[in-house]
């Protein structure tokens, strides 16, 4: 694909991402609770999301100090 985005993840980050996507899918499908993440999981997933936004050309949230100016992601 000419317009593809490729993210390279270490195994642990890929596992955290897969677990989180599964939990979100179950939550959306059946209302299952989303398990809290550890500090390490949150950090790793945050880095993946920031990298993805950069690759998509989307400005990063919280670059501005004003909450009203922060873009909504949903």
Image (cartoon, rainbow, N blue to C red):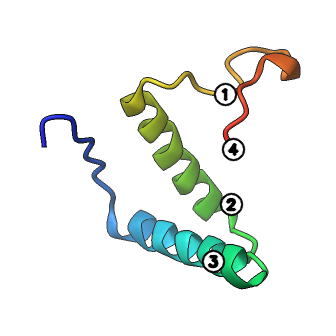
Q: Determine the residue positioned at 54% across, 55% down.
A: 45
Cα gap from disc 1 to disc 4, whole angstroms: 12 Å
Residue, disc 2: 39
Q: Which of marks 3 and 1 is nearer the N terminus?
A: 3
Q: Separation of disc 3 and disc 2 at Cα?
A: 17 Å
Name above or below for residue 60 compared with residue 12.
above
The image quadrant that residue 60 belongs to is top right
Residue 43, horizontal then vertical, whole percent: 60, 52
Q: Name the residue under label 3.
A: 23
User: Is 26 placed above or below 36 here?
Assistant: below
Disc 4, SS = loop
Quick one: 69 or 62, which is closer to the camera?
69
Q: Do the residues labelled 1 and 4 touch (CB within 8 Å)?
A: no
Mark before the other along the chain sequence, 2 or 1: 2
Instruction: Name the residue tied to disc 1.
Output: 61
Residue drawn at the location 58% of the way across and 47% of the way down: 46
Name the mark on residue 74: 4
Verify CB contact (< 8 Å) between mark 2 and mark 1.
Answer: no
- Which of the marked residues, 4 or 3, is nearer the chain's N terminus? 3
């Amino acid at each position: 694909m000419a317009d593809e985005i490729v993210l390279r993840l270490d195994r642990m980050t890929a596992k955290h991402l897969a677990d989180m996507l599964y939990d979100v899918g179950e939550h959306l499908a059946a209302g299952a609770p989303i398990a809290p993440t550890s500090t390490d999981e949150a950090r790793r997933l945050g880095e993946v999301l920031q990298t993805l936004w950069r690759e998509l050309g989307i400005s990063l949230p919280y670059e501005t100090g004003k909450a009203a100016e922060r873009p909504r992601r949903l």
